Amino acid sequence: MRPVRIGLSLASHHLVDEPARGVQIMIERAKVGAAAGLDFLSLGDQHVTPTPYFQNVPMLARLVAVWPDNPKRQVGCLFLLPLWHPVLVAEQVATLSSLHPGRFILQTGIGGGAHTFAAMGASLRTRGRDIDESIRIIDALLAGEKVDSERFGLSRARISPVPEKPVEWWLGGHSDAALDRAARLGADLYIGPGSIESVRDITERFSHACDRHGTSANRVVARADVIVADRSVAAIELAEGIFDTGYRGMSMADVVVGDTATVSARFAALAELGVTDIAVRQMRVDQPVALRSIELLAEIRAQLA
């Protein structure tokens, strides 16, 4: 079994009165993740939010300045493709990839929410077909090809620059259709936060889908919402306090809490299920707690190695 990579899936949603403070929170967390030796830095994608959400493309461009200029320590971000025009995604990715020497991580998701789709002028009904066509177009554009698409009204579209290295596709999802899509394309799989049982179910179904298509993934990435503290009891108390106020419909079983030994054991269990990379997201905690939690990931990396 190869060593599990641990990276930072940086939270972009911060309840701040001054936008500059939200940006500073993200910069501070990225700096600590860089010092901890984490393997990758990634950002999410969300739109038309009623509370501050700092958008991925400009934020990643800023954060690359504090991330190690090392090709093995990658950067990337998520695009909910049905909400984006594929040419724009390809152009943004190509520019972002030029800011860092590593292979850019292009995460994809199908998105959801009628309000969000309506506000972005996208269709929930056709999002499955839209993401399939977007992936085809973006992949070809990033390879320097000219692209036609009746669905998006493209005729011999092309972009410049193109990435010097091929991008690394992480396709997100847990439905049968999403798993089949990732397997059919031979892409890496990105699994959202959840219990060990849910990850086992997803990895088993993905393995069966790969068998059907005769493909395999280089990486299986699992996001983990985490609180690491110097003492397990402190982490548990923090997590319980969060869930007392209601946390995105999740339960304690969906998150990883504890000291470094406890969290290392949980990550090792994920590795036993075939997970190669863990994208750590800090829970909704005060900044000093989040920074210490990220800092302690250095010890967890060492234990897993």
Image (cartoon, rainbow, N blue to C red):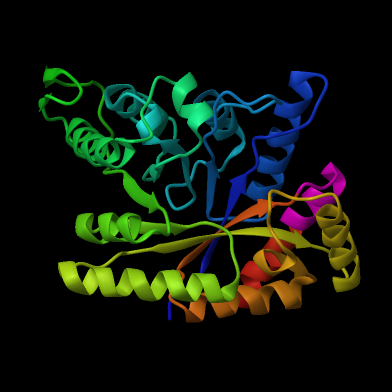
Q: Is residue 247 visible?
A: yes
* Left or right relative to 49: residue 188: left
* Left or right relative to 242: residue 168: left
Which image quadrant: the N terminus? bottom left
Q: For the stretch drawn in magenta, what is the main secondary structure? A: helix
Quadrant in the picture for residue 37: bottom right
* Left or right relative to 134: residue 46: right
- Span highlighted in magenta in the image: 284-294
Instruction: State the residue at coordinates (81%, 56%).
Output: 243
Instruction: State the residue at coordinates (39%, 58%).
Output: 175
Q: Is residue 305 visible?
A: no
Residue 99 belongs to magenta span: no
Q: Nearer the viewer, residue 29 or 252?
A: 252
* Left or right relative to 144: residue 241: right
- Give how far across and how far down residue 110 sits, in percent: 40, 42
Rendered position, 113 above or below 74: above
Quadrant in the picture for residue 65: top right
Which image quadrant: the C terminus? bottom right
Q: Nearer the viewer, residue 303 or 79?
A: 79
- Give how far across and how far down residue 159 sits, in percent: 22, 21
- Give how far across and how far down residue 187 sits, in percent: 28, 56
Instruction: State the residue at coordinates (80%, 71%).
Output: 259
Residue 287 belongs to magenta span: yes
- Give how far across and how far down residue 168 sits, in percent: 33, 48
